[in-house]
Amino acid sequence: MIARLWHGRTPREKADSYVEYIKKTGVRDQTSIEGNRGDYVFHRIEGDVAHFIVLSLWDSWDAVRRFAGEDPERAVYYPEDGQYLLEMPPDIEHYEVSVSPK
C-alpha cells in the first residue's frame, strides 16, 4: 500500500471553508478512483495560518497514477486552489505503508 501526503497552508480565517472545498474537489476525486483506500484530511491552526495534511492511501502506483497522472510526484491542484492556499508546492511525498490497522 502507498501513502500519498500533501501539505498546504491557508489563512486561518479560510480554514473551515477550505475543508468544505477540499471535500468537494480532491477528496471526492481521489476516493472515486479504483485502488484508493481512503483519504484523511488533518489540520491545525498555528497563529494566523491553518496547516493541512491530506493523506490518501492507494493499492498500487498504477492507482496513484489514475489520479495524479504520469508524474505522481507532482501535486494535483484545482482552479480555485489559489483562492485558499498561501502557496502551491509542486511536489508531494509518497511512502510505502509498512504497518497499518487491520
Image (cartoon, rainbow, N blue to C red):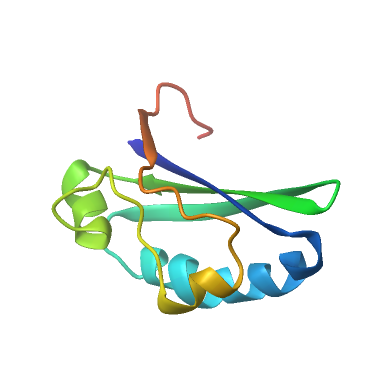
Residue lying at the far right of the rendered structure = 47
- Residue 35: % across, % down: 28, 55
5 horizontally vs 65: left or right: right
Q: Is residue 39 above or below residue 102?
A: below
Q: Is residue 79 above or below residue 4?
A: below
- Residue 27: % across, % down: 48, 66
- Residue 3: % across, % down: 40, 38
- Identify the residue at image location x=20%, y=53%: 65
Residue 69 appears in which quarter of the rendering? bottom left
- Residue 97: % across, % down: 40, 28
Q: Is residue 43 above or below residue 20?
A: above
- Identify the residue at image location x=49%, y=30%: 100
Residue 92 appears in which quarter of the rendering? top left
Quarter of the image with the N terminus is top left
Residue lying at the far top of the rendered structure = 98
Total labels drawn: 0
- Identify the residue at image location x=35%, y=60%: 76
- Identify the residue at image location x=86%, y=46%: 47
57 horizontally vs 55: left or right: left
Residue 26 appears in which quarter of the rendering? bottom left
22 horizontally vs 36: left or right: right
66 horizontally vs 81: left or right: left
